């Protein structure tokens, strides 16, 4: 019988590199579970251990079109057998639907931008008019890494853009586009709050002057963050925030994550000129920028904290097996 281990469910080997290194450095036994094509035997039992779901909403951009759908069945199978899954079925559901994210965030008292979902060219244009704001954002309901997010100054510009599409499926894999009010960052950056084990770890300020593709993974960066103007130093796109998080927002986000089977995640928000914070994205498959961590000092290392959290959960699962108790989530 194979010894229990942490099984990492994913579809992007590049994003796995820092986690692999950290798990091995921490001495946590682990299994690479790459999900693209595969099978799940209804009559078989899963291996023992802890299962960390890192499936990404952007998997289709790497030619892994059905990885999310297969992972949904896999996670259902694991949870049916009482296995400990970090970021379970509900977390995966929210990973691939921003509209459902907003519904759940609002249910927990978290402010989100005004948003209208629509499918079909005419309905998308109608939704933009109904939004009644300019400029506004068009984004995919099922996206990832900020891909496909566009800013429009008026409905006419949107209409011209839609005319150039063969199908609205080019906007979002599920055919659902979101028309959303644009919240201008008062300080020129958005904030990404990282949660590990369902609890706040740190926040990253992300410079938005280069566009909406804000994936913090080191593998996503190419060269300098920006080309500086003559005489200026290159700007660091990601930097750890020195500000204390808003206590009320933090409490509501932790409550939201706990209610949605999400333990390792990130929440992105923008603060307007009136000091109001709007959460516009939740990332259930989160990555970290090691360069920003090193620049901030203080020894903060989110991936190391993830590895240690998974190691603790594996130890708990082993102990509960010895005691003959259910192995599922026991809290942090």
Image (cartoon, rainbow, N blue to C red):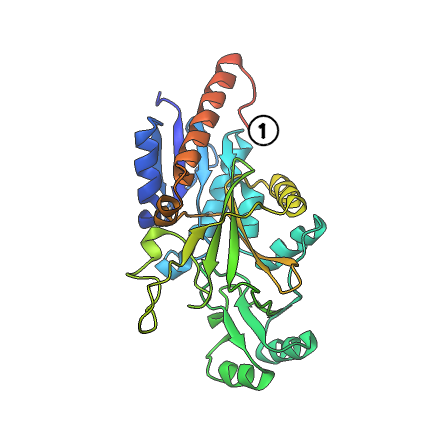
* Viewer-closest of 303 and 31: 303
Q: On the picture, is 34 further left or further right than 252?
A: left
Quadrant location of the N terminus?
A: top left
State which quarter of the image contains the C terminus: top right
- Residue 142: percent from the left, percent from the top? 52, 60
The number of numbered discs placed on residues in the rendered structure image is 1
- Picture quadrant of residue 122: bottom right
Under circle 1, the secondary element is loop
**Considering depth in this image, is 238 or 267 the residue closer to the camera?**
238
Q: Which residue is mark 1?
A: 331
**Could you tell me residue 259's position as x and y percent?**
64, 41
Whether 49 is drawn above or below 220: the answer is: above
Q: Residue 278's x, y, as percent? A: 63, 58
Circle 1 crowding by C-alpha within 10 Å: few under 14, some 14–19, many from 20: few
Dividing the picture into quarters, in which one does residue 314 lie? top left
Instruction: Report x, y in % for residue 149.
Output: 49, 68
* Residue 46 in sight from this viewpoint: no
Q: Is residue 147 visible?
A: yes
Q: What residue is at 57 percent from the left and 68 percent from the top?
A: 184
Left or right placement of residue 222 versus residue 324 in this view: left
């Amino acid at each position: 019988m194979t010894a229990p281990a942490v099984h990492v469910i994913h579809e992007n080997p590049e994003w796995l590199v820092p986690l692999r290194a950290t798990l091995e450095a921490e001495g946590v036994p682990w299994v690479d579970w790459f999900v693209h094509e595969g099978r799940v035997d209804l009559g078989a039992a899963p291996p023992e251990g802890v299962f960390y779901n890192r499936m990404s909403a952007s998997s289709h951009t790497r030619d892994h079109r059905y990885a999310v759908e297969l992972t949904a069945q896999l996670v259902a199978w694991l949870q049916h057998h009482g296995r400990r899954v970090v970021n379970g079925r509900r977390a995966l559901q929210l990973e691939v639907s921003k509209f459902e994210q907003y519904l759940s965030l609002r249910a927990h008292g978290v402010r989100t931008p005004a948003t209208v979902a629509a499918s079909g060219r005419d309905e998308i244009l109608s939704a933009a008019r109904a939004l009644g704001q300019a400029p506004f954002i068009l984004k995919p309901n099922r996206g990832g890494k900020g891909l496909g997010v566009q800013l429009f100054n008026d409905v006419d510009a949107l209409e011209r853009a839609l005319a150039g599409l063969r199908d609205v499926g080019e906007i979002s894999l599920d055919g659902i586009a979101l028309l959303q009010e644009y919240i201008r960052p008062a300080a020129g950056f958005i904030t990404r709050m990282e949660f590990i084990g369902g609890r706040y770890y740190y926040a990253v300020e992300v410079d938005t002057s280069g566009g909406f593709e804000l994936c913090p993974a080191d593998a996503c960066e190419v060269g300098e963050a920006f080309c500086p103007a003559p005489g200026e130093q290159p700007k660091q796109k990601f930097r750890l925030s020195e500000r204390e998080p808003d206590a009320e927002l933090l409490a509501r986000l932790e409550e939201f994550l706990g209610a949605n089977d999400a333990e390792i995640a990130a929440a992105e928000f923008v603060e307007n000129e009136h000091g109001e914070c709007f959460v516009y994205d939740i990332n259930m498959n989160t990555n970290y920028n090691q360069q920003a961590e090193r620049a901030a000092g203080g020894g903060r290392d989110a991936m190391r904290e993830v590895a240690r959290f998974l190691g603790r959960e594996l130890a708990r699962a082993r102990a509960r097996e010895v005691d003959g108790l259910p192995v599922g989530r026991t809290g942090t």
